[in-house]
Image (cartoon, rainbow, N blue to C red):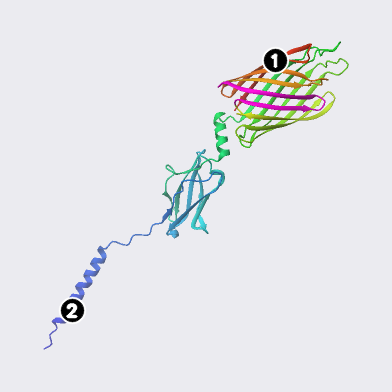
Amino acid sequence: MVDHRPRRFSFIVLIVSTLLFFATGARADPSPAPEPALHHAPVSVARSGAPLSLVADIDHPELVRSAFVVYRASDETAVHEVPFLRASDGPYLATIPAEHVRAPAIRYAVELELVQGGRRGVFASRGDMQEVEVPADLEDSREIALAQRLDNRRSVVATSAEYVMFGDGGLPGSRSDRYWRTEAGYTYRPLRTIAEFGIRAGVVRGPNPDPTKPDLGLNYGAPSLRLSFGDIWHLEGEFLTSVTEVGFSVGTGASLLVGDPYGSKLTLGFETIQVFGTRIFSRMDIAARKNLVIAPIVEVTNMPHADRFGVRLLTEARFDVGQGVAFGIQGGYQARVASSGGPSLALSAQYAF
């Protein structure tokens, strides 16, 4: 008689093992679904005026539709974004344009747009961005410092009026040697190598000391440009064009400024225009107080149409009343001959914005 118990036992063991296998497999946790991730080394310093490149690795890129750098320039509230692209020097590269990389800092975060929909932040956040310091270069630093001193008022409109008497001219039968002038102008201040540029226009009128000649007249315009060669050296040039009583005239002028361009400084310059005359001057601006500048002026001129040069000794006081508004008053004495001379008075006003 054959004993079938070993076979029955083996069969029972197989059934039990199978049941245990399925029971254990049912209780086991399923493998987690893959999640995209971005690996990025934060940037802390960037160069002003140069593109800022950010490199990143992405795990499971098949689950990512796109990746973005969202950023905000230091002087803006608007948020910009640039995408990550495949790059030759790294898996993915995003570049912030140079015009947005400005002192003192730029801030950024990184976001992923998933294939399944929606965006999520993976580095920093829009509310708490990574700050990148952007040190200013020397020219940037100078511009920022000057702009702060001027309350960032880069545009200036100005007007002035002047009445000048040189006396009787020193000749028998001559008329009074005098004239009046009025002028208005606009100036813009980039505060960089080109420190300022602007234009002024004016009118000059007065009787000719020689009664046999026509009265004096000048209608002029003068664009100007000021260049900076450092903290204390500035050179200003201008081109004059005008209409006089004898026709069209052109001229030029130049000034050298030594010192603080918006404080105490020495100015040496000249101005000449065909037919009308030439003037050579020196001016010393002295910042007596924060809101007061006193300026003694010495001028040698044969304007307008004089047959000889005269000397003018003047003093100007300019008062800054705040909010970009300033007023000036100028007075002095001038003469072309020792036996005759006369006073002068000028008023000016300007508004910076």
Where in the figure is residue 31, as x and y percent of width and height?
A: 32, 62
For the point 74% across and 19% down, which residue is it? 181
Label 2 belongs to which residue? 10
User: In the orientation shown, which residue stands out farthest toward the right?
Assistant: 212
Where in the figure is residue 311, as x and y percent of width and height?
A: 75, 18
Where in the figure is residue 208, as x and y percent of width and height?
A: 83, 17
Left or right position of 7 against 147: left
Residue 116, compared with residue 281, is above or below; it is below
Left or right position of 32 against 178: left
Q: Give, as a three-letter code, the residue at label 2.
A: Ser
User: In the orientation shown, which residue stands out farthest toward the bottom?
Assistant: 1
Range of residues picked out in magenta:
263-291
289 and 6: which is toward the camera: 289
Marks 1 and 2, how far apart at CA: 128 Å
**Numbered label attached to residue 332:** 1
Q: Give, as a three-letter code, the residue at label 1.
A: Gly
218 and 293: which is toward the camera: 293
Residue 239, compared with residue 62, is above or below; it is above
User: In the orientation shown, which residue stands out farthest toward the front?
Assistant: 338
Q: Main secondary structure of the magenta part?
A: strand
Mark 1 vs 2, N-terminal side = 2
Corner quadrant of residue 16: bottom left
Where in the figure is residue 174, as x and y percent of width and height?
A: 84, 12
